[in-house]
Image (spheres, rainbow, N blue to C red):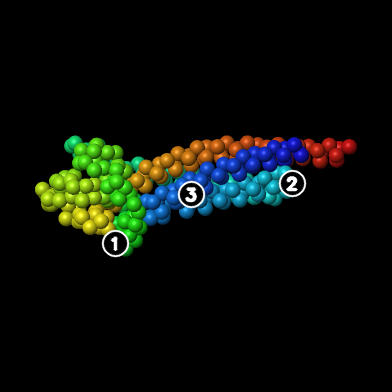
């Protein structure tokens, strides 16, 4: 029994370690400017990681100190958390399966359309009240100013691989036909009727295209890219957690069998 309990404790120590990449993924998301402005995914990921850490610690204590009720709590609670993590992994995949950039002639960067993304993500930016808060947060960053420091010539900028957020918020849509002065200053549009964003563009450095649908789409494209990376981490951790959980269940069952066999031998003698 002691050996089995030690094995269960060691397995739960691995579960403790597996909570770290989950918490780390949430913290990484919270440090990204776009995620910190919209605040959707990072806190559920962090909270779920912390809960897995707490439950794994309970299993660790229950295994090494032979506390059966704590091990039973670990088995039930960890199963629930694994199911929640699996649901989160599937949810992130489903809401990010749509949304892609559009190629424009003579441009290396992509353009983004709001309607290309899932309804869940679009609802996060459609509300005027929500977007005003997000817009204020985005405009306080240096992402657009960095473009002016990096690209002086029009062709250099057109050949640049800028982020979706920069493509959507820091410049007017290519189809409007604005003339390049610098990455955040454009003049003489050819076709202002091509898109409502053509009229929304402003050379005022605090405005730019932050009120454009292209900026909302660029934000969602950035979120999609970062959420997909986080989802890969969560998926790998989920598979490892399931493996650890199944081994722990087997060890717990063997421990109970050893205990019953020992009690049977004592009663027989």
Q: Is residue 257 visible?
A: no
Rounded to the nearest angstrom, the CA distance separating label 2 from label 3 is 32 Å
Of labels 1 and 2, the one closer to you: 1
Q: Look at the numbered discs 1 and 2 and tell me whether their residues touch, using CB distance below 8 Å.
A: no
Q: Residue furthest bottom?
A: 129
At 27% across and 51% down in the image, what residue appears? 169
* Residue 261 in view: yes
Name the quadrant of the N terminus.
Answer: top right
Q: Are marks 3 and 1 in contact (CB under 8 Å)?
A: no
Q: Toward which corner of the image does residue 10 lie, by quadrant?
A: top right
Label 2 sits on a secondary structure element that is loop
Report the residue at 50% width, 37% height from top: 236
Instruction: Report x, y in % for residue 175.
Output: 16, 45
Q: Residues within 10 Å of mark 1 (few under 14, many from 20)?
A: few
Find residue 114 and report its horizontal and vertical position in percent.
Answer: 26, 49
Tell me the element at label 1.
helix
| Disc 3 target residue | 27
């Amino acid at each position: 029994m002691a050996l089995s309990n030690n094995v269960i404790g060691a397995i739960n120590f691995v579960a403790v370690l597996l909570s770290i990449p989950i918490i780390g993924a949430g913290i990484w998301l919270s440090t990204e400017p776009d995620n910190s402005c919209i605040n959707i995914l990072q806190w559920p990921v962090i909270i779920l990681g912390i809960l897995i850490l707490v439950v794994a610690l309970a299993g660790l204590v229950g295994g090494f100190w032979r506390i059966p009720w704590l091990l039973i709590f670990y088995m039930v609670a960890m199963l629930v958390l694994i199911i929640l993590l699996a649901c989160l992994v599937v949810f992130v995949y489903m809401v990010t399966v749509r949304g892609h950039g559009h190629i424009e002639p003579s441009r290396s960067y992509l353009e983004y359309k709001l309607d290309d993304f899932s309804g869940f993500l679009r609802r996060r930016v459609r509300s005027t009240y929500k977007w005003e808060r997000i817009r204020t947060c985005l405009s306080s960053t240096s992402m657009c100013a960095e473009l002016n420091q990096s690209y002086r010539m029009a062709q250099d900028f057109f050949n640049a691989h800028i982020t979706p957020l920069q493509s959507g918020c820091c410049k007017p849509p290519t189809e409007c036909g604005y003339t390049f002065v610098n990455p955040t200053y454009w003049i003489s549009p050819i076709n202002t009727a091509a898109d409502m964003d053509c009229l929304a563009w402003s050379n005022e450095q605090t405005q730019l295209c932050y009120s454009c649908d292209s900026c909302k789409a660029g934000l969602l494209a950035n979120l999609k890219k970062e959420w997909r990376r986080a989802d890969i981490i969560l998926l790998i951790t989920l598979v490892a957690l399931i493996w650890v959980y199944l081994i722990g269940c087997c060890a717990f069952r063997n421990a109970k069998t050893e205990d019953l066999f020992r009690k049977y031998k004592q009663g027989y003698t």
